[in-house]
Image (tube, rainbow, N blue to C red):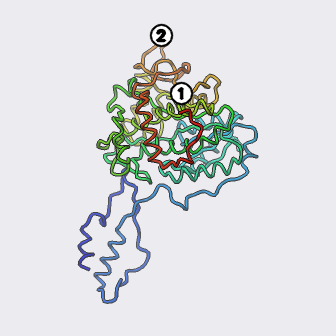
Amino acid sequence: VAAIAAASSVSAFAPLAVNSNSRVQQKSAVAPVTPVFEGWSSTDSQLCASLLTDTQMPEKLYMPQQKEAPKVLGGVKIGTRKLVVITGASSGLGLECAKTLAKSGRYFVIMAVRNVEKAKTVAKKLEFPDDSYTVMKLELGSLQSVRDFVGNLKAFKSARPLTNLICNAAVYRPTDPEPAWTDDGFEMSMGVNHLGHFLLVNLLLDDMSKAKNARICIVGSITGNTNTVGGGLVYPQADLAQLEGFEQGARQPVSMIDGKPFFGAKAYKDSKICNMMTVSELHRRYHETTGIVFSSMYPGCIADTALFREKRSWFRKGFPWFMKYVTGGYVGQEEAGERLAQVIDDPQCSKSNVYWSWNGGAQQVGRWSPDGKPRGAGGSGGEIFENEQSGAVKDAVKAKKMWDLSVDLVGLKPKEMFKKSAV
């Protein structure tokens, strides 16, 4: 009893404040307090029960009971259309891209999302054709969920190969003073934006190699490209250093890829460098042997997207105005979604290892053109073009090291790796 009483002062048993940085769940007592052992006083029993009640257990992003029963007979629904998977398809860029492709009549869309019911609701609200899509559970913050999703996808589509994969989902937590963690112990931005997608792509490569004109697009960001205003002049800059954090295992308490203390805004930028490096490595290893087109893209600054939900209210109100009227970099969600769909659908985008952008000014500060409209910084309108990646993204030695370490981190086994590599 004395030992238990002493434990009441230990922080592990103390009630914790629930905030955006920690996923915790409080357990509740479900029965009246009764003596635990014969001879214990009521006071001691109440103390013990109180400790058990106040103990807070980590809440997983994905639990075994959340695994979906696989959908079947998808081949009948898909018909002769191309099959596309879009991660993060319940809001913002992913949702608008899904809408564009679903309504084209040429694609059957798999909306790969965390919240299945939300995705179903917004798809109906936006009047997706009933036979143009299905929704599947995917929690990129859980490697097990990624594997379960791949299994369910294969059961749904049967022998029909996947034609297109769009890795769009992302988290951005710039105001967090402390890191949040995935189910596997990775810092949330890196775990979701890079490692979850890295595993997903590798598990689907073999299947997609059997499709005609297959394409994989991993959404990049101007903030991860240090030769741009957003990536080079806005602090902090993305910098993987020598990937010391990955070498240390990248699991809690290691929160940054460079092994340094946590910095939320930089964690996001670092994950975007990894995304674009992954595209380059996929191209180098697999384009020649599979014909799959690997690309990245920056749709412009979607300043009113939910990606900025972690920002302070003044920023969420002022940033769209600033991007519209000062830099000219603003692009609406619908137009951004159409741009992402273009990378998958347009014959012009059949070249592999390209970082696609629009408007011809994505490396410049926004400017005003003679017609009185803002131009530059990848804003609304303009034409698609092949953008230049930064030297950091094109560092082939570091990209290979990032790839090899990522393979180990996500637990890819040799038998799971696609065999037809040009390397």
List x then y, in percent, for residue 412.
51, 48
Position of 62 with respect to 80 (left or right) is: left
The image quadrant that residue 290 belongs to is: top right
Total labels: the figure holds 2
Position of 399 with respect to 237 (left or right) is: right
Mark 2 vs 1, N-terminal side: 1
**Could you say which is closer to the camera, residue 349 or residue 299?**
349
Which amino acid lies under the numbered mark 2 shown in the image of this protein?
Answer: Pro
Q: What is the crowding at mark 2: few (fewer than 14 residues within 10 Å), some, or many (at least 20)?
A: few
Of badges 2 and 1, nearer the viewer stands: 1
> Which residue reaches farthest front?
423
Distance between the alpha carbons at the discs numbered 2 and 1: 34 Å
According to the picture, the residue beneath numbered tag 2 turns out to be 370
Which amino acid lies under the numbered mark 1 shown in the image of this protein?
Answer: Asn
Element at label 2: loop
Q: Is residue 115 above or below residue 313?
A: below
List x then y, in percent, for residue 230.
39, 27
Residue under the image location 39 percent in, 59 percent down: 24
The image quadrant that residue 176 belongs to is: top left
Q: Is residue 190 above or below residue 383?
A: below
Res. 374 visible in picture: no
> Which residue reaches farthest bottom?
39
List x then y, in percent, for residue 345.
64, 29
According to the picture, the residue beneath numbered tag 1 turns out to be 353
Res. 91 visible in picture: yes
List x then y, in percent, for residue 93.
54, 36
Residue under the image location 30 percent in, 64 percent down: 12
Q: What is the crowding at mark 1: few (fewer than 14 residues within 10 Å), some, or many (at least 20)?
A: many
Residue under the image location 53 percent in, 25 percent down: 356
Element at label 1: loop
Q: Quadrant of the N terminus?
A: bottom left
